[in-house]
Amino acid sequence: MEASSKPKHAVGVLATLILVAAVANLNLAVANVALPDIGRAFDASQTSLNLVAVGYSLGLATSVLYLGAVGDRYGRKTMLILGTALAIPASILAAFSPTIEFLFVARVFGGLAAGMAFPTTLALITALWSGPGRTRAIALWSGLGGAFAALGPLISGALLTKYEWGSVFIVTVPLALVALMLAIKLIPSHVNETTDPVDHLGGMLSILMVAGVVLAINFVPPTYAVTTMLGLLAIGVAAGIGFYIRQRRARNPLYDLDIAARRIFWVAAVAGIIVFGTLMAAMFIGQQYLQNVLGYSTLDSGLAILPAAVFLVLIAPLSAKLVERRGARVALLVGYLFCLLGFIAMFTLWDEGAAYWKIGLGYALIGAGVGFAGTPASHSLTCSVPVRRAGMASATSDLQRDLGGALMQSMLGSVLAAGYTAKFSGLIASSPDADKVSSNTRAELENSFSSAANTAQSNPQYADQIIAAARESFLQGDDWAYLAGMAAILAGAIIVATLFPKRGDEKRLLDEYAAADQNRR
């Protein structure tokens, strides 16, 4: 059994790291419950709302690889403090955004700030703890981090009962201030950091690669944006090829592709992207469904997600024990099973008159799934790399959440938008009054549920018909999205079942990795 070690003031240090991560996790989720209000305030299209929802994840996903390496080289505590400090003005800018475009940019800026702080939290856990103590610390970090993300809609919903939509972005400011003071006081300054130079060119290419691909996905549904979508995709693909070539040739690569090729590492990375993306996508679509279709208030829609947070917290410690006893593969597959059951529940039970128990069941299953799968996904990454590359493992773990959230929200949001537009277009075409609907009005109705609701307010004589059609269209869109989510979950489960090693092989491979890393020093 591997001996355990832990830092001085271990409880305070771990609480501080979890609190710093909580700032990022809350910011990831607070926008979801406010999307209907934001849509009405700016008369925004579904694509614009998708971009607002994904903006924070996008900022994080583009930056974690690069900034994780910068932290490894120049000081993890410095990056932690800088990122936490910048989160404060980023939140304020988002709260007072004058346009939907400004709000998107502010959200990306907030994600970049989190990209400085968030990677260092897991890197420091990896560097400061070892043995079973590290597994337990990661379980707490993963479970509570996910719970904070799940609680975001509840906090936002409570605020929106009394305040404007901008209030949801202010909520993390006091938390960031407390985390900043604790980090300055408690976090060790230098722990197993490298002296290798940072691959800045590789960092820039990684940013372009992730940003290009994620943004391209968001511009798939609108037919007027085909050129934009193809241009962004070309940038992402070209940057990805350049990134691969650079990492193979660089003396000190940003991302060690030999380590990334390790089976435990890359399978865990892919598994985590899908499972964490499942949580973010479920909250993203679910919050709009609850308010747009069921007519929940912002507070009620926030309360509805509580089962996900509760089951995340309850399951995470059990997951850590399951990893130690049965291996990461079993824990990952159990998590995938619960996530799949959650999406099946949403697809079959979440209709126009769904009772709350059906809503709670779907969220509880998703929470249990992420609770089981989150710990092994992060644990496998950190255990399969040398401590000197802890920032790479941490950045990849963060990338699981951020890229998973960005990709799954983008993909499912695009499918939702396509399904909504297709259904509303069909309803208009089949209406006996179709010739009376102007092209401008048709575009507004097919734009998004929020845009259709604004049109209904302007045309009270048709308000009931418009809202009924918008609800029916949204239901088709979210059904399409749930099916896409199920396909992604099944693909991930197949990858884990066929390629992730069983417990005995996992331990053998980890020992081989450790020996190889010792020889490379």
Image: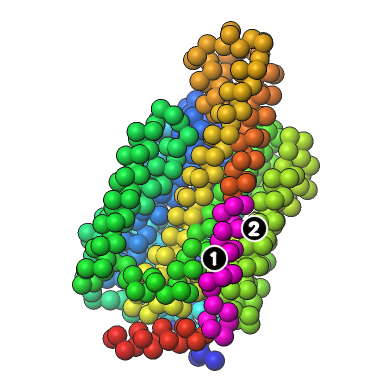
Nearest to N terminus: mark 2 or mark 1: 2
How many residues crowd mark 2 within 10 Å: few (<14), some (14–19), many (20+)?
Answer: many
The secondary structure that dominates the magenta segment is: helix
Give, as a three-letter code, the residue at label 1.
Ile
Front-most of 172 and 363? 363
User: Does residue 166 appear to the left or right of 151 in the view shown?
Assistant: left
Q: Residue 142 lies in magenta, yes or no?
A: no
Q: Position of residue 377 (x, y in %)?
A: 52, 68
What residue is disc 2 on? 339
User: Foreground residue, 43 or 348?
Assistant: 348
Whether the magenta-drawn stretch holds residue 499 is answered as yes
| 467 relative to 517 in the view: left or right | right
Looking at the picture, how far across and down is residue 192, in whole percent? 33, 79
User: Relative to 42, is 247 above or below?
Assistant: below
Q: CA distance from mark 2 to mark 1?
A: 15 Å
What span is colored magenta in the figure?
486-506
What residue appears at the point 76 percent right and 47 percent down from the top-left corner?
358
Apparent side of residue 311 relative to residue 5 in the rendered image (left or right): right
* Camera-side residue of 229 and 11: 229
Residue under pointer 1: 495
Residue at the (64%, 21%) spot, across then down: 427
